[in-house]
Amino acid sequence: MEINDILQKSRDTEPFDKDELIEMLSFPPDSTESYLLMAEANRISKELTENKAEVHAQFSLNLAPCACNCSFCSFAKKYGIFEHETEISPEEAVSFAKQFERDGANAIFVMTTANYPFSKFIEVSQEIKKNLRNETTLIANIGDQSLENAKKLKQAGYAGVYHALRLREGIDTSLSPENRKKSIRNFQEVGLKVGTCVEPIGPEHTNEEIAELILFTGSFNPSYSGAARRIAIPGTEMASIGMISELRMAQIVAVTRIGIPKTVLGNCTHEPCTLGGIAGANLFWAEVGANPRDIKERTEEGRGESVESCRNIFRECGWDIWELSSRYYLS
C-alpha cells in the first residue's frame, strides 16, 4: 500500500492485517513514511484522550535473583547481578504508594519477582489499599496466576494488572506462552482490566514477530498496548546484541497505535522519551525501588523517572496531563 492509502484506511477506522503492519514496520525509521505514521498515531491518541496523557507509577515489594531467568532481565539468577533477596516492609510499601498518590500518579503499580509469596502479596496489598484514597487506581504487576488467585487480587482492591506475552516467550524466557495467555484470560474473567505491551523489542526481532504481537495485544481489548525496547543490561547475554534506537521504538509505538482497535484508549512506551510522546504514546511510568531494566537496587538513582519528570516529557511533546484516576482501567 502507498502511505496515503495507509493513512486513509486509518482515518476510516478500518482494521489492518498482519501484512499491512509488516509493511508499516518495514519503512526505514528515518523516512517520510515513518514520520507520517508517527503523526497519524499522535492524532489518534490525542483524539481518543482529548490530548491528556497519563503517568502511572510503580514500586517493587522485593528484589531477588529470579529462577525464571529471562534473558533480558537484571533479576535473572543466572547473571548474578543481584545475589541476595531484599524486601520492603508493609510500612515502606504504604509510604511509596502514598507518595505516588501525592505526586499525582494516575495509577499505582505494585510489582514483585516471580518467587514472591502470593499470600504475602495479598496481605501487603490490603495494607496499601486501606491507606489510599478510594478513587486511587491500584494495579498488580506479578507473574502468571490461577483463576482463584485472580479473584483474590480483585478482592484485595486491584482494578487491573499488567501482563504481557513477551517477544520470544518460552525462548528468551523459561515461561510458557500458553500460561501467559491463560493468565490474561483469568484476570479478565474476574473483572480485572489488563494492560499490556509489545516488549522487550531488540534488533533481532523481525517485523513479522512484532506485527503478530501487535495483533495479539489488540485481540483481547486491553486497557492499553504500546511498545518498549529492550534495555541492554551490562553482563547479560543480550547486551552483545545491542538495542534498537529510540527512533525505531517510536516507529513501533506508532504502528502499534494504528494497528490496535480505537476502543483501546492507552498506548504506552517505556522508558519515557519525547520521541515516544510525539509518536502516539500517552502513557509513561515513573519508578522507584527494584527495576528489571536497571542494575541499581534503587532505580530512582539510575534509570527510573519521577512522576513530575514524566509529566514534563509529555509537556515537551505538546501533551496536557490527565489529573484524575486512570481512564485506561475504566474503559
Image (tube, rainbow, N blue to C red):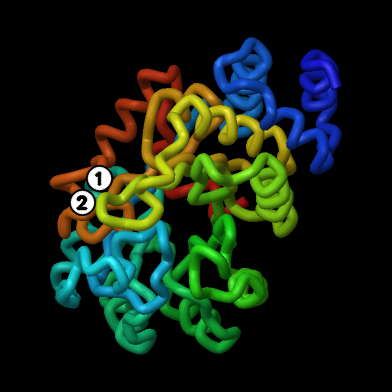
**Number of numbered callouts drawn:** 2
Residue under the image location 68 percent in, 15 percent down: 33
Disc assigned to residue 304: 1
Q: Locate the N terminus and report the quarter of the image it occupies.
A: top right
The answer to whether one can see residue 25 in this image is yes
As drawn, 254 above or below 68 = above
Residue under the image location 26 percent in, 55 percent down: 235
Q: In the picture provided, is 74 more to the left or to the right than 21?
A: left
Q: Position of residue 120 (x, y in %)?
A: 30, 85
Name the residue nearer the viewer: 193 or 252. 252
The answer to whether one can see residue 263 in this image is no
Residue under the image location 37 percent in, 22 percent down: 315
As drawn, 266 above or below 223 = above
CB contact under 8 Å: marks 1 and 2: yes
Q: Amino acid at mark 2?
A: Thr
Q: Secondary structure at mark 2?
A: helix
Q: In the picture provided, is 78 more to the left or to the right than 21?
A: left
Q: Residues within 10 Å of mark 2 (few under 14, many from 20)?
A: many
Disc assigned to residue 77: none
User: Toward which corner of the image does residue 125 lie, by quadrant?
Assistant: bottom left
For disc 2, the marked residue is 299
As drawn, 120 above or below 104 = below
Q: Amino acid at mark 1?
A: Gly
Q: Secondary structure at mark 1?
A: loop
